[in-house]
Structures are given as structure tokens and as C-alpha cells.
Image (cartoon, coloured by chain):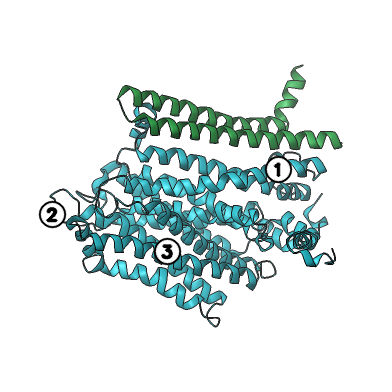
Amino acid sequence: MSISQHKDEDEILFRPIYHSGKGFYILAGGLLVVLLFGIAMYIRQLIFGLGETGMNEPVTWGFYIISFVFFIGISHAGTLISAILRLSKAEWRRPITRMAEVITGIVLLIGGLHPIIDLGRPDRIMHIFERGRLQSPLLWDLTSITAYFTASTIYLYLPLIPDIALLRDRGGRLHKLYKILSWGYDGTERQRHVLERAINILMVMVIPIAISVHTVISWIFSMTLQPGWHSTIFGPYFVVGAIFSGIAALIIVMIAFRKAYHFEDYLKNIHFNYLGTLLLVMSLLWFYFTFAEYLTSFYGHEPTEMRVFLYKFIGNYAPYFWAMVACNFIIPVVLLSNKKTKTIPGLLAASIAVTIGMWLERLIVVVPSLANPRLPFSTGVYIPSLTEISLLAAAASAFILGFMAFSRLFPLISIWEIKEGREDSVRLVSDRLNQYLPSVGHIKK
Amino acid sequence: MIKKTISFFRKPIFVQIILLSFLWMLASGMTLLLINLVNVSYEVNDHQSASIAISILGIAVFWILAGILTYVLVGLYRGKKEES
């Protein structure tokens, strides 16, 4: 069947797969240049070693580990948020879940590469497989990130199958690929049952996996006795920060693709309003954890802890620390607690601020503690090199490029879930209402 | 016989089986890796309790994930066959 024979009420959702304007290619070209420059700089680092970076003694972790923690954090946008919304049967989730799940897949891939980039001799990673020490949180991380990536990819793929079947039936240049990936899905009763059952199992499974991933990442820091890191609340603090940055990233992606592909009928103000409220709540929660974390350090007044504390509050890292507080707390709270500014542009500004702020937070966690170690070193200095900056830019470009490539292959909004929502949502919601409230048995289905 | 074999390799099911087998290879690979790392931890007298707990959890997760995907893909294939 040819593409032109199909006219779907959700035709606009298919459009990015078959048509892309000049702007798409110009942007993709620009991003590709940044990505290639980053790869070239990495090859240079491979040849000349880690001396090409700003890392030194005692600051042995820099941009790469900061970006690793940051990108893995963003991955919580997807699967975790999508799973929670599905599990709570939030009907407004339908146009959002796919984009959230795609974010997870892409950023996990990018984030997962950073520890390898951080190695001066990446070939030595093979030693992990032969003689790795499983008591190290770094190896727990390897296990949990691989599990999360596998679970997220399956969780992205399964709800994609009905949409791939739609694409297969429309024919086109990638017909063979869609035929393989759709696994013969025809929407029969049994197939739907199987798919629904598997998605239900997965959405329960991915929530603890996702939480474990960022908890384990926090343990890389908190299991050491390094001042500023040895904290019992680092696990939940990191998880809160991850969800916070994930929601911000999701909002930015939604606004960008809504504008680019004219998805205004699907991504409505109400979706942004709900996500804005969620972002505001997470901002308050983040502030609570930050306050609790620093108050404990300050009250203890332990000399090595205080060195790190003062380094962040009034020392060399004070501009970054206070910028982080402004980006993660002041800007989102001011913008999102006021109805006049809780608009899409306001939400975009708040989300960009949070994304920058959360990257700064990772910087604030990693560098000051290393620069002020418990051992009798003089205070370290870390100035990132061009290699590190270009690799950060390359990672950001790879994220956008990955998303653009996905939009050329698969629908960014789950078409079958939208159709199902149109057909069944009213009945499902009224059924639920009849169960929740004893006096609404008269609600018509 | 040869014709039948060639036509099987050209069918989507052949590629699909390969894709699915990758996941089982990953699950098996992770299992072997974790078992090896537990052995290493015994050799070097590391604290084994954490190693064993993480290994058991990790291995279970990978096998469950592989099982779920196999269940879906076999289910979809059978669902189609029965209806047709």
C-alpha cells in the first residue's frame, strides 16, 4: 500500500517520518560538525593522554564524570516518569510517554560512554571483566546502568510495536525494517493482551531499577570518606535531582518538537501546566534536600568538611554555587508559582534554568570535594580544557541528533495510545470514578 | 531442502530470532561476568556479601528482562498465527 492511500486523523504525527524541511538538515549538519569536532578532540586525547584535560592531582575527576552523573540523571525523565504516569493511570500521559522514554534511551547511551572517555587508556576497561572488584560501587554502577538501559530499551520498544505495525502497513522506504520490528503485530485480541501484560510487568520493574541507578551513582561518592561526599542522604538527594532535571529536559524537548512539528493539538497547555506543577514541586523538594545536606555539614563544623563548605559558599566555587541555587530554586519557583508566568515560554525558561542548574549541581558535588581532600594536599585547581568543553558540546549535540534521528524513523507521540485514549478513556475514567466514589454510580459510560 | 533453508534466512523471522538472541547473549554474558567477579572477590578476600547480593539481583533482572521480551515476541507471533 502506498503512503498516499492512507489518511489518518493523526496524520500529522506521521509527517516528520516522511517529510523534513531544509531547517532539519541545516540543524542536523551543524550538530554533526560539533559532534565530529568532539570526536576529533577525543582522538587527540587518546593519542596524547589525559594531560590534554584540566584534570590533575588532587582533582582527578572533571567534566566527564560531571556529565556522566548529569546525563544519567536526565535519563530519569523517561522511563521513571512514564512508568509512574502509566501506573497511576494518568490519562494525560498519552502524548508524553514516548518522548520521555526516548530521552532515557539516548542519554543513557551518552552518559554511559563518559566513564570510558574519562579513562586515559580505554583499552584497559577489559580488566574490569577479568579482575574487576565487585565491592567497588563503580562496578555496581556498571551492573545497574546496563540493567536500566536494557529495561528502558525494552520499555521503549514494546509500546512502539503497534505504531511500527502502522508504519509497516503504510509501506514506504523502510518497509522491511518495520516488518521485522513489528513482529507480525496485527492488533489481534491475543497480541494486545500479551503486549499489555508485558508493559504492565515492565512498568513495575523499571521504577526500582531507575531509582537504584541513581542511588548507586550517589554511592560512588558517598561510600568514600571524602569531605562533602560522605553523606547518608546522597542516595535520595541524587534521585530527587535526577527526576528534577529529567522533567526539565522533557519539557524542553516537548516544547521544541511541538513547535517544530506543529504538535499543538497533542501537546496542549494542560500538559505543560501539569508538568510545570511537577517541576515546581521537585524544585521545592530539591531545595529541602540541599538545605538538609548543607545544614548538617555546617552544624557539625568538622574542619575538613568546613573547608569544602566554605569553598562552595564564599570561596572559588561561590559563583557556581549561587548560580545553581538561582537556577534550581529561585527562577523556577518565581516563574512557576505565578499564574501569569506559568506559560509555555515561562516554563521553557524555568526548564532551561533547571537544566543548567542541575549541571552546576553536579559540578559543585564533584570538584570542590576533590579540590579540598582530607589528605594534606594544598587546595586543588581545576580548569577544564578545550577537549573537555568540546566533548560536553558533542554530548549535547549527540542528544539532539539522536532525538532528531528517532523522529525520522518512528512517531514521537504514541499514535495507538492516542487512538485508544479517544475510544476508551471516557469509559475507563467513568468506570474508575464509579469504583472510587459511592455516589456516582449514575455516571454514564 | 536448500531452497527452503535459503528462503528461511530471507524471512523476517530469521532477523527477529537473531535480535532476540542478542538479549539472551547479554543476559548470559552478564551472568558469566558477575559469577567471575564473585570468584575474584573470593580470591582477593574482598567483602563478599555485597558482591553476592548485587550479583543475585543483577542476574535475576537480566533474565527476567530477556524472558519478558521473549514472552512478548513469541506471544505476538502465535497471536498472529492463531487468528490467521
Q: Amino acid at mark 2?
A: Ser
Q: Is residue B37 above or below residue A430?
A: above
Q: Are marks 2 and 1 on the same chain?
A: yes
Mark 1 lies on a secondary structure that is helix
| Visible residue check, residue A175 | no
- Label 3 with label 1: CB-CB less than 8 Å: no
Indicate the quadrant where residue A96 lies: bottom right
How far apart in space, not on screen, are marks 3 and 1 (Cα)?
35 Å
Residue B62 position within the rendered picture, expressed as x and y whole percent measured from the top left? 54, 34
* Circle nearer the N terminus (2, 1): 1
* Circle nearer the N terminus (3, 1): 1
Name the subunit of mark 2: A
Asked whether, in this view, residue A176 is left or right of residue B27, the answer is: right
Q: Which residue is mark 3?
A: A286
Q: Nearer the viewer, mark 2 or mark 3?
A: 3
How far apart in space, not on screen, are marks 2 and 3 (Cα)?
32 Å
Q: Are marks 3 and 1 on the same chain?
A: yes
Q: Which mark is residue A197?
A: 1
Q: Which residue is mark 2?
A: A378
Find chain B in the image and tell me its colour.
Answer: green
Tell me what residue is drawn at x 35 percent, y 54 percent.
A66
Q: Amino acid at mark 3?
A: Trp
Mark 2 lies on a secondary structure that is loop
